[in-house]
Image (cartoon, rainbow, N blue to C red):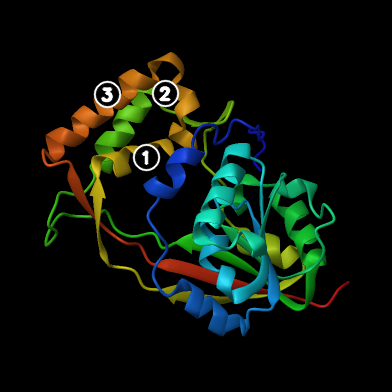
């Protein structure tokens, strides 16, 4: 991924139980936009690479005959299985614990391959080339991400916004100034430039679609704490024996900002970039 960082299995260790509660949902209408853009009819196959707890795959499950989620974290796979069962779609959802670099793993071919804020953790050139070979003729790779927005303000909201800057300062006080990532650090953050990677792999595009957000969401103190522990740079294992002390300070900070324990957030928009599989070399 970067010259000075190597993936290891602790990247999201302990985060899976917090992920679904802590992360803000994708913008409403994402499934409809993607279904229309790709002409999906409920009969194809989706592979969600770096699926986490199945958030995107289960949001899109009705657009396909089968969805396959791939993730290297056992906790994430277990959460995805539970969520699929709760949603009543276990019969058409399959979950595989594996790194993206281990594909194709005999999984067959797919109509769509999706990466939801996961591509930056991988050997992107290798994975893009491999996934292109797993797509059926006319298939597409879909890159899904939150739209970056301005720093939120509390103006017009019923509750205070989460004090992200102060929370970040608290995390750095416990874990250091350099961003942690598994057993290593990311001094320069995660890489961008996925467009160049996908073009090198033979994809054509992108076709960009924006699904607007903006809906006001109510978040509890527990939701906010879950959000912090769902992030790779503040995953529970990184705090070691100081985890409880960190959580106590975090909750104290949040209560100072909002004695009611309630916060408001504006749902981010969602960006969908569709890359078509070009003709095989």
How far apart are labels 1 and 3 at the CA level? Answer: 13 Å
Q: Badge 1: how crowded within 10 Å, few (<14), some, or many (20+)?
A: many
The residue mark sitting in front, 2 or 3, is 3
Q: Residue at x 63, y 83 (%)?
A: 41
Res. 52 visible in picture: no
Q: Residue at x 37, y 43 (%)?
A: 227
**Residue 255: quadrant of the picture:** top left
Give the secondary structure at mark 1. helix
- Is 133 situated left or right of 216 in this image? right
In the picture shown, does residue 227 fall above or below 203?
above
Q: Which mark is first along the chain, 3 or 1?
A: 1
Local SS, label 3: helix
Q: Is residue 219 left or right of residue 19?
A: left
Give the image location of residue 176, x and y in percent. 41, 23
The quadrant holding residue 114 is: bottom right
Task: Identify the disc placed on residue 248.
Answer: 3
Q: Which residue is mark 2?
A: 175
Q: How many marks?
A: 3
**Tag 1 residue:** 226
User: Residue 86 location in percent, x, y?
Assistant: 50, 55
């Amino acid at each position: 991924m970067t010259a000075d960082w190597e993936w290891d299995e602790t990247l999201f260790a302990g985060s899976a139980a917090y992920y679904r509660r802590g992360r803000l949902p994708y913008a409403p209408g994402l499934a409809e936009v993607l279904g229309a853009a790709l002409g999906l009819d409920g009969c194809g196959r989706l592979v969600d690479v770096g699926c986490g707890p199945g958030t995107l795959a289960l949001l899109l499950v009705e657009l396909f005959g089968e969805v396959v989620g791939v993730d290297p974290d056992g906790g994430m796979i277990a959460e995805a299985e539970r969520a699929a069962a709760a949603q009543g779609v276990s019969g058409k959802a399959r979950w595989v614990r594996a790194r993206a670099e281990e594909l194709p793993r005999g999984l067959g071919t797919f109509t769509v391959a999706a990466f939801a804020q996961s591509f930056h953790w991988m050997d992107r050139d290798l994975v893009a080339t491999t996934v292109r070979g797993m797509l059926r003729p006319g298939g597409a790779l879909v890159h899904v991400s939150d739209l970056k927005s301005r720093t939120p303000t509390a103006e017009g909201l019923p509750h205070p916004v989460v004090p992200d800057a102060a929370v970040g300062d608290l995390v750095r006080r416990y874990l250091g100034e350099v961003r942690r990532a598994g057993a290593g650090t990311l001094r320069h953050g995660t890489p961008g430039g996925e467009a160049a990677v996908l073009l090198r792999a033979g994809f054509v595009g992108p076709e960009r679609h924006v699904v607007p957000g903006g809906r006001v969401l109510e978040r509890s103190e527990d939701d906010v704490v879950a959000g912090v522990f769902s992030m790779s740079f503040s995953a529970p294992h990184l705090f070691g024996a100081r985890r409880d002390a960190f959580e106590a300070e975090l909750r104290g900070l949040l209560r100072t900002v909002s004695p009611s324990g309630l916060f408001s957030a504006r749902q981010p928009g969602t960006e969908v970039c569709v890359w078509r599989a070009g003709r095989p070399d």
